[in-house]
Image (tube, rainbow, N blue to C red):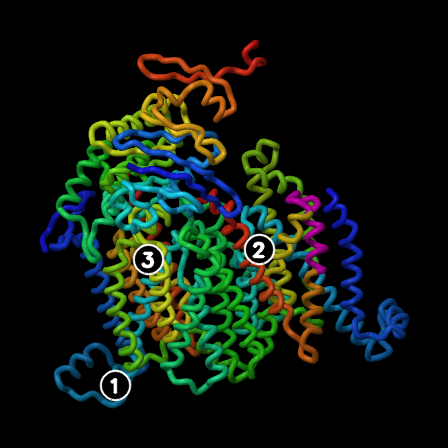
Amino acid sequence: MLETRNVCAAYGPLEVLKDVSVQFQEGRLTAVVGPNGCGKSSLLKAIMGFLPVSAGEILLQGKSVPSIGRRKLARKIAYLPQDCFCPDYMTLGELIELAGFSRYSLVGGPTERDRQLFKDVLHTVGLADRADFPVNKLSGGQRQRAWIAMVLAQDTNVILLDEPVNHLDMKYQFAILELVKELTVNRGKTVIAVLHDLNLTTAFADEVVLLRAGSCVTSGPVGETVTAQNIEQVFDFRTQIFPHDGRLVCLPELSASTAVS
Amino acid sequence: MKPGLATDGKRVLRFANGLQIRTGNLMAGIGLGAVVLVLAAYSSGLGLTETGLGDLFRLLFGTQLSDAEDFALWTVRLPRIVLGFLIGWAVGLSGAMLQSIARNPLADPGLFGFSQGSMTMIMLLLVFLPAAPKGLIAIAALAGGLSVAWLLIWLVGNERSTGLSIVLMGIAIETVLSSFGSLLILYLPAETSLALSEWLAGSLFQANWSLISAFVPLFLLSIVGILLLGPALATYDLGTEMAMALGERVATTRPLILMFAVVLSSAAVTAVGPLVFLGVLAPHLAGFVSPAVARARLFLSGLMGGILVVSADALTRGLASGIPMPLGLSLTMIGVPLFIIALRLQALRKLQSH
Amino acid sequence: MTRRALFIWSALPLLLVVLCVHLFSGISLASLPGSMDAVLRFEAQSYEQAVLLFQRMPRALIAAYVGSVTAASGFVLQSLARNPLASPSTMGVNAGAALFLVAGALIFDIGVVFQGVAALVGAVIGFLSCVAVSRIAGRQNDPRGLSLILSGALVSMLFTGITNALLLSDPARRSDFLNWVTGNINHAYIDRLELFWWIGVLSLCTFVVLARPLTLILFGSEKAASAGVNVPLVSRLAFFAAVLGAGSAVAVCGPIGFVGLIVPHIVRPIMGSNLVVAIPACMITGTIVCLLADLFAREALQPFVLNTGLVMDLLGGVVFVIIVKRFYLSPKVRGANV
């Protein structure tokens, strides 16, 4: 299990995480939600050690994450940044092969097992026939699936995704999140994803962490946490939240002036 | 070692430990190697004395050459060709490495200020110790390059900084150092100043076998470096954070790679002076010949760098006019047209594939 | 607003003071009226007056020309390239002009007028090759026109290398040009200023005419186009004027690097990015900076006279480091980038 205990972090003088304590359940999809600049990405970066933690601890199965070496950590946690860049010369297959980097020996390459995994992963995301394409020539939706494939090919139990459905149209948003959800259900992966859309959160996430101005307002199962009161506290606007087809739907309330017209 | 298919379906040769070489890249490597040999053979026949490859073979079979032929071939031309290749290899390789670190296709040892650092140190040495032995010059060059690298890391900060900021800071340091260089050239006595600029212009005329023997261990070391660092550099291409997420120890390996690039470039600077653009041209042209990642990319870049310098040297000697043409100029004269042709060809290939 | 007012009220007096110090330092107070008289009548009756008239006045004029034209060009280039590091010296303009002038003088033995033409051609070619290199290499991840700066640095290095090599081919004339190549405000170059001053004036006029549309382009080319600006024409004209203006400054006294980089960074925090007010402010500040640099070069290591270009280069390099530190390494920017 991954957990943060009283984590504080700052970019120079700018405090981005204040006393954040969250437990991420194993085998569940946890959504990190909050307004812009509330420290969602910073939380993931702090877990990965990209952002130095000034106080508190981050534990993975009871072990302090910063004390785990980079290479070992890469076999336990995979991370997908918000914006990914791939050099023009790299094909999808080559990108996927890089994902196994932490498992290769110093002068070695992918083993038989690795290669089988890479093939499976490409099938899972539906890009098996695109393996010889340069990544930058794929379409937007395909490219995002390619990056998801790379994260999967890293073969870790914990996966951190920073806004995995940014810049995608609705169809691909659902496709990607269905894929991610399936990973937690069928393969028991622990996924932590930064999401913007409350309706996507309630549709796919099991757990939710609500952040505001660097502090964790509340966290827990979606059904208990996503309430009109909590959402107003975090986002500063009123919503109606009602169950529909077994999931919660969030409907922002219009301001009085718009509602009249 | 047995043939197989890579994840993207391309043919590879695979070793027992998983190391795999793309057949396409291997062929390209062999092809480029052949080009080097052909160029060397052609280049050995260029010059005032009528001699060339044929005489070299006759020498191997025991026939004596005349003193003039022996001198031209053995003391002038062959060392230039061999040293040219080694230097091209070193600069091409360090350019390819720095481009991954900076994540920018324009990075090269000059842009990072390494060449300028080496040059400044050598200039200071030549000013204060004009009779310094060759070995000391090499050490000075290395020290200059390394102090620039250290300064860069110190100014840019920790592992979390982006590659781009490193290259920008490199340009900044380069500017300060180069104005210091002009200061020296301008205010030194005319003779020293002339000697300095002559050296700055860059040329292979100092090539000799002892210099080459100093270069060979570096060449071998660089091959080991390619094997060890190749995949790590490919992860750098995805950004520092991605590299760390994939398990690359950026805090340790980045200084290591920078240092390796410094050693390569300062060795080249010691031998022939600065070669602008070579570090940019070589990896690009190599990429046009055969797209490659990781180790193969580094290897092909080095080979291409060697080819460029050997052919530039051939051009310098072939034109053989009164003006001593600096190597950097002939390099550009060869590299830029090749680059444009490669771009056109690539555009054509793209048109055909659609 | 207050800072702006302060600048407007203090810039001109400051310019006047610096100019007076530049002209009259070392000249005794008692002889001042006489020297003023000499200046007005353009006749020198004593050694001091001759120094003032035939050394310091020309130097001040050259400094004013180079400072104002280069600084304004730098501001325009930074606005158009959207990069705080853009300037004639970082975009291949200075190195190109220097190379062509030296090549023309040494290989083809051309006179002063054609040297100027060669410098202008070189400035344009240097800039164009910088653009070409960045076009070829510039790819998807190039925020804020950075590849232009990198290719500019590469092109400059190459051109400077070739210039140095060319100078080697003629050791006898090398020392004449060495001073010029490092950039030197020297009264000997006043005849060049007499030949080329109109180019700089033309490009300054172009900036002033185009100031409003250029400011609109700052907000994005599409926004400018929707406001009725012919974006390609305006930006091309402005680029051309900036390159030619900077090239003419190089033709006069060699590449005085980094005035074009530093001055816009002094002006922008005070006057904002509106070119209508920033261009005149750049001209005044550029003049002050060049006069001060020249004064420093002349007086700092008496009796030796330094090259103004070198003083500016060293100063500029340090400012370059500071700009990189501030714009690309501050925690806030880094947080946004990563």
The location of residue B197, given as percent across then percent down, is 48, 76
The reply to whether residue A216 is in sight is yes
Q: Are marks 1 and 3 on the same chain?
A: yes
Q: Which residue is mark 3?
A: B283
Tell me the tag on residue C87: 2
Question: Horizontal placement of C273 versus C160: left or right?
Answer: right
B200 or A245: nearer the viewer: A245
- The amino acid at mark 2 is Ser
In the displayed structure, does residue C331 sit left or right of residue B239?
A: right
User: Residue A42 placed where, x, y %?
Assistant: 42, 40
**Quadrant (top left/top right/bottom left/bottom right) for the N terminus of chain A:** top left
- The quadrant of the rendering that contains the C terminus of chain A is top right
Q: Residue at x 24, y 38 (%)?
A: A157
Corner quadrant of residue B203: bottom left
- Residue type for callout 3: Pro
| Nearest to viewer (mark 1 / mark 3) | 3
Against C263, is B331 above or below? below
User: Badge 1 is on which residue?
Assistant: B69
Q: Where does the magenta region start and end?
A: C271-288
Q: CA distance from mark 1 to mark 3?
A: 36 Å
Seen in the picture, residue B233 relative to C161 is either above or below; the reply is: above
Is disc 2 in the same subunit as disc 1? Answer: no
On residue B190, the disc is none
